[in-house]
Image (cartoon, helix red, strand yellow):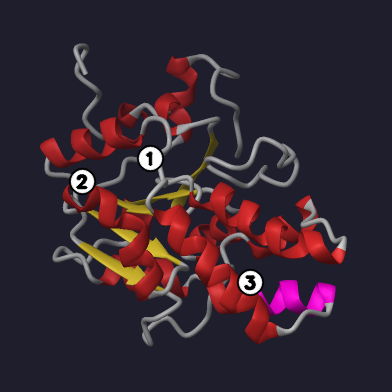
Amino acid sequence: MSQEDQSIKPNLRRCLFQPVTHCIFELDGLLIDSERLRNDSIQKILDPFGHTYGFDLKMRCMGKPESEQVDLIVNTYDLNRYDFEHQLKLLSRGEYARLKLLPGVERLLKHLHDFNIPMAIGSSSCRNSFEAKTRRYSRLFDVFHHVVLSGSDEEVKKGKPAPDIFLATASKFNESPEPSKCLVFESSLLGMEAALAAGMQVVLVPDPLVSMRSSALATLRLKSLESFRPQYFGLPPFLRSS
């Protein structure tokens, strides 16, 4: 069931969710603004050809491993794959230094870490790009128990919307929690589908243009992580001063 941030009363909303013990986060478009920068880079590559990187194609790409995203784009616009990847890599290098945390991220991660809530990342990135994207915030990202990347880790046989990425991530926690005890934070519809297929609840923070109908299966839909209330899922609430 999906609800906007303020669409139901707090005392009713708490009844809709099940308590969890572990949290799994996507990276791109949820924790850092890498999706926006990547979209800008792709559009710069397409400009000389007169193409527009449209919303529908962006949604089809979001959540997929990076190699599959490239396949979709070069096939859609009949581009040379080598040239496209080379240009994208060059543009991305300059942008990684400008990546910013998205609203509410730092507060939430520090809060969960302070209360010893186990956290991990389950992302579609590959290892090299993950390290480059997170280097600026390496100290903050130390709060995560582990990272699983479907773009590099062989244990993830199928990318999203298959549940492999989140099942693999959950299995690496020391406590080996049941899927129902894991809460996934996602920004893509494919990630939402993968989390639900894994038997997990999912908090979706999508692009504002994503329709309510498309995200209707999300456990909770938010405009940003600033709106997240941990206590709805049985997690320690924010302190008033935080």
Residue 29 placement (x, y as % from top left): 50, 48
Residue 184 placement (x, y as % from top left): 41, 51
Q: Amino acid at mark 2?
A: Leu
Q: Residue at x 85, y 61 (%)?
A: 51
Q: Which callout, 3 or 2, points at the residue further toward the start of the chain?
A: 3
In space, the residues marked 1 and 3 are separated at their CA atoms by: 23 Å
Q: Which residue was labeled with disc 1? A: 101
In space, the residues marked 2 and 1 are separated at their CA atoms by: 10 Å
Which quarter of the image is occupied by the N terminus? top right
Question: Is mark 2 in CB contact (under 8 Å) with mark 1?
Answer: yes
Q: Secondary structure at mark 1?
A: loop
Where does the magenta region start and end?
69-77
Which quarter of the image is occupied by the C terminus? top left
Q: Amino acid at mark 3?
A: Gln
User: Residue 24 sits in which quadrant?
Assistant: bottom left
Q: Which residue was labeled with disc 2? A: 140
Question: Is mark 3 in CB contact (under 8 Å) with mark 2?
Answer: no
Q: Which residue was labeled with disc 3? A: 69
Q: Residue at x 71, y 57 (%)?
A: 43
Q: Amino acid at mark 1?
A: Leu
